[in-house]
Amino acid sequence: MTVRKIVPKKPWAGRFKAGTDPRVEAFTSSVAIDRRLYRHDIAGSMAHCRALQRAGVLSAKETSKLITGLQQVEAEIRGGRFKFRPEYEDIHMAIEARLTELVGEVGGKLHTGRSRNDQVVLDLRLYLREAVVELLGLLRQWELSLVSLARREAGTVMPGYTHLQRAQPVLFAHHLLAYVEMAERDKGRLRDALRRINVLPLGAGALAGTNYPVDREYTARLLNFPMVSANSLDTVSDRDFVVETLSALSLVMMHASRFAEELVLWSSQEFGFVDLPDSVCTGSSMMPQKKNPDVPELIRGKTGRVYGHLMAVLTLLKGLPLSYNRDLQEDKEPLFDAIDTASDSLELLAVIVAEMTVRREELARAAASGFMLATELADYLVLKGVAFRTAHAIVGRLVRARLDQGEDLMGITLEELRTFSKAFEKDALDMLTVEGALERKSQIGGTARTRVVARLKVLERELRAEA
Ligand code: ARG
């Protein structure tokens, strides 16, 4: 960094003899990041003007001048005509400076009874409550893509896994709906966070409150806040709602990442369960045959960023004395990036789910393969009065013997079964179908067709009602 000319004339320059070092200007400026708050800043300022008018601080004429000016600034920014000069410390200063250029001296009255400390947190809350509503919508889109695939593939079976080893057959729809359950919890957490985001901070001033008789409940009504914050010191220093959002988004990304991991596995030649749409894959610059699942891989990778952002903000906050500290300016970049990352990831997952091809025969073959039905045989013995542990041991020996013969469970005869236990009778062979194995798991939460379809219906109805 080189020292160039010292730029004077900050709104707070009164008590300073010298101007700011340009390196400090660059270091402290946040306008490149917080400019995305411009609409919220202007909406907050307009409500503040009205509250000041009602308190008798601004005349009707001044108020309307300020509001018209603010509308003009908003139009300039929206139209891309606004010059964000880096010497504006932040979006709040940038807007006020331009407003004053436009409306003259009365622009200087906007900041009466307000500090950037309550202003910035107002902007952040206004922004975040919109962003959270959008995220709820994107989660719903992902869920809709999953339930409609579950509907389309209602008959499809697949191997269920534990330890990534084939375990027991399940319905493909059951597997998809597991992610819908996760997304439902994600939405619950975001909605819960929304209640604490939705609190009016304006009126806390710099830290102690304001000398002007503003009616904070009036401002809250103007801005649609159901609650007014109760302690000015807490108000300007609280970023719990940022942490809560980042925490909820970390879980969103964890779920997205686990699903992405399954897509990577399923689309591999080793699994061959699905084909991802060409539009979300990329090729190799060297190997002509490659089609790589880059989008799921990047979702998995970007999850780490969001976790990092959560840690960054928690760490940012842990040592701060009350009340406002400039450190707090560092909350926005991680928050915004987490929101962008989660939004993009959810949007793309919904596209992939809607467009991928499910290879039913491969899934069905894998579901019936190997020893997926061994547990059914053990449970058959239990039905015949054998203790489960004994039954488990008997079937374990049977599996071992078949493995040694290079066979799986398919094609086993009653005679062979009876060499392991006389409790096997001819209905034992009926246990060895995927359909039967599924249908027996008919308790709440099980993979039986009727259960899965019933849950699917409930989820479809709930998702429809959310529109
Ligand atoms: N840009 C700051 C932030 O994002 C708000 C400004 C408060 N600055 C101050 N010197 N009190 O937190």
Image (cartoon, grey):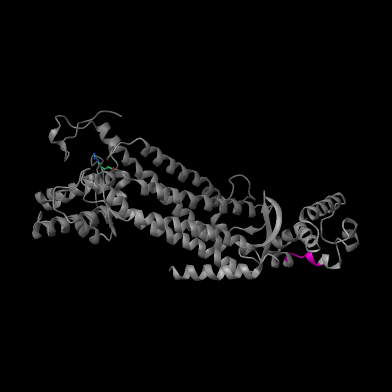
Above or below, 256 relative to 150:
above
Task: Out of 221 and 72, give the one closest to the viewer.
Answer: 221
Ligand 1 quarter of the rendering = top left
Residue visible at 55% across and 66% down? 147
Q: Is residue 256 left or right of residue 102?
A: right
**Magenta region's main secondary structure?**
helix
Res. 418 image quadrant: bottom right
Q: Is residue 428 left or right of residue 27?
A: right
Q: Which quarter shows the C terminus?
A: bottom left
User: Any magenta on residue 433?
Assistant: yes
Circle count: 0
Res 331 visible: yes
Q: Is residue 265 left or right of residue 375?
A: left
Give residue 234's position: percent from left, percent from top: 28, 45
Give residue 261's position: percent from left, percent from top: 59, 50
The magenta stretch is 430-434
Give residue 455's position: percent from left, percent from top: 57, 68
Task: Out of 389 and 202, give the one closest to the viewer.
Answer: 389
Give residue 325's position: percent from left, percent from top: 28, 38
User: Any magenta on residue 209?
Assistant: no
Task: Out of 250 and 393, give the one closest to the viewer.
Answer: 393
Residue visible at 25% across and 52% down? 41
Q: Is residue 281 left or right of residue 315?
A: right
Res 83 visible: no
Q: Which quarter shows the N terminus?
A: top left
